[in-house]
Image (cartoon, coloured by chain):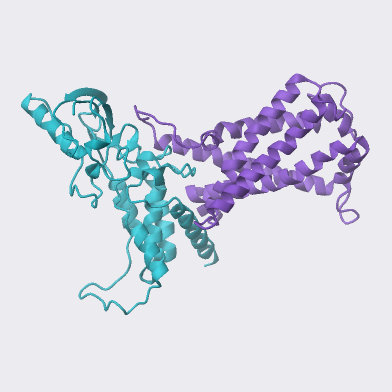
Amino acid sequence: MKLTLRVWRQKNADAEGAMSTYEVDAISPDMSFLEMLDVLNEQLILAGEEPVAFDHDCREGICGACSLVINGDAHGPERTTTCQLHMRSFRDGDTIDIEPWRASAFPVIKDLVVDRSAFDRIIQAGGYITAPTGSAPEAHATAVPKADADLAFEHAECIGCGACVAACPNGAAMLFTSAKVNHLNVLPQGAPERETRVLDMVAQMDAEGFGGCTLTGECATACPKGIPLVSITGMNKEWLRATRKAGKR
Amino acid sequence: MARTVWDSTVGKKAVMAVSGVIMLMYLVVHVIGNLKIFFGAGEFNHYAHWLRTVGEPFMHYEWTLWLVRIVLVVAVAAHATSAYQLSRRDIKARPDKYVHRKPRASYATRTMRWGGVILGLFIVWHILDLTTGTVHSGGFQEGHPYQNVVDTFSTWYGNVVYIVAMLALGLHVRHGFWSAAQTLGVGSRTRDRALKTVADVLALLLTAGFVAVPVGVMTGVVS
């Protein structure tokens, strides 16, 4: 496959960026999108140019490190992560636009790499449970109804890649935060911090400069792990409940 | 608690949802009242007079009406202020647009902000036209709403302004009602289809009901 790539190039956080055009040839349809970028970078290095910086780690679709907005879609045209997107999803001769996640809470560090540490601070604010460390607890000590376990697991699938923020026209982190809140709030292990978790995580989310939710649903459409839009409804419910309870104290 | 709600994006959205639902309930009552115009000047004018005497003898003349007006003004102010502040925040949160842009959300969703502005301006015109009579075409007569309505919809601009605003209303309610349910945490997977249907039906009935009046005047059914 022969492709034309239009890639966002930006020297550092303070520099002005722009789209640069590159040609790549002999791309196999079985390559992943990141392998195709590896080919581009080898080509750039041989030509003595600066390679394109992009985030990646496991390349198995489970770590949440890779990003990229491809032709206007977070993680590209398929519902998966960029590392699991294959070049057979494109056609020979295509022009592909590659841009970084766009949100003021995710500033660009270089080229296609953005700083997603705002997510880490949201987790620090309440995305944990209180449990004694040391030996693993007896697995059946705390019974969890099957339906609750399934719901928790569905939300636990969030890998924190930030595609929801990238897709949201308001740069909101509602889907990410709601996945974490729902995951822990539905479980008995998460019950002691049920109220403080949602209040603190939403407060941190706001403090990071993410936008608000207008329920466009673009986050859930972009999510490679299929976190549903109704997850946000669940978090709103938890937040209103926690606010009422806090008001009574 | 009020501080927590107002300072949070989730809380401010809840303020929008509650004020929106209050206005929506008012509109359902309003459209039912409007349809009485099809039963003649007597019934319509009598209904308009009754609105001022609701609650008597417990309430004084027009007290109930003023109470409703105060609630509505508070709802409109809360809705508009939170919408403005949230929108400012949203635009700041996404300063750089994508080079490769795709419109994806539905038309109703994408037009919420400008639709809201159109509705706000419409409400001002609507009150100046048919409540105070300040910008009314022809001689505004206090206590004769039937004739006043016919006068308004006998002008081309009266019809255009009104019908455009009612189409904007339908779109606004379509996304707004369903969104309010999500914001207040009453949406769920099993209820989603029902909520979307109710939103569509409400939007359609309100728009059709309101637009029926200018259409009635234009076609001569109401004169």
Q: Chain B, which colour? A: purple
Question: Can you say whether A183 is above or below A52 in the image?
Answer: below
Q: Provide residue A175's location: percent of width, then percent of height.
A: 40, 50
Side of A28 relative to A70 (left or right): left
Q: Residue furthest right?
A: B42
Question: Can you say whether A49 is above or below A246 in the image?
Answer: above
Q: Chain A, which colour? A: cyan
The quadrant the N terminus of chain B occupies is bottom right
B220, A70: nearer the viewer: B220
Q: Residue at x 73, y 20 (%)?
A: B157
Q: State whether residue A146 appears in this view.
A: yes
Side of B174 relative to A43 (left or right): right
A190, A22: nearer the viewer: A22
Side of B108 relative to B155 (left or right): left
B148, A155: nearer the viewer: A155
B120, B193: nearer the viewer: B193
